[in-house]
Image (cartoon, helix red, strand yellow):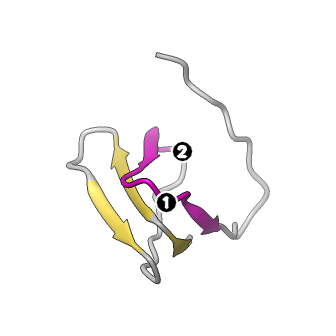
């Protein structure tokens, strides 16, 4: 994924939170639970591409 605007905090299960800023890119491990939230008052706009078909399953806490 590439963060097109804003700031995004991403946390993968068992790992520390990473902060993405505009123009940063990240590659997430398959099937690893994670969460993300915008870090400032601007909206987060992401471009996300996948190599294979997938199922996205939201987890409500």
- Residue positioned 66% across, 32% down in the render: 57
Rendered view: 7 above or below 24: above
| Boundaries of the magenta span | 32-47
Residue 41: % across, % down: 43, 53
Residue 60: % across, % down: 54, 18
Rendered view: 54 above or below 58: below
Front-lying residue, 20 or 15? 20
Q: Are marks 2 and 1 in contact (CB under 8 Å)?
A: no
According to the picture, the residue beneath numbered tag 1 turns out to be 42
Number of numbered tags placed on the structure image: 2
Rendered view: 50 above or below 29: below
Kindly give the residue lying farthest to the bottom in the view shown: 23
The N terminus: image quadrant: bottom right
Earlier in the chain: of badge 2 and badge 1, it is 2
Q: Quadrant of residue 22?
A: bottom left
Q: Residues within 10 Å of mark 2 (few under 14, many from 20)?
A: few
- Residue positioned 25% across, 50% down in the render: 17
According to the picture, the residue beneath numbered tag 2 turns out to be 31
Kindly give the residue lying farthest to the top in the view shown: 61
Judged from the image, the secondary structure of the residue bearing numbered disc 2 is loop
Front-lying residue, 43 or 16? 43
40 lies left or right of 16: right
């Amino acid at each position: 994924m590439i963060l097109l605007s804003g700031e995004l905090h991403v946390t993968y299960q068992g790992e520390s939170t990473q902060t993405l800023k505009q123009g940063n890119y990240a590659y997430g491990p398959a099937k690893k639970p994670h969460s993300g939230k915008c870090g400032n008052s601007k909206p987060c706009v992401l471009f996300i591409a996948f190599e294979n078909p997938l199922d996205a399953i939201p987890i409500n806490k």
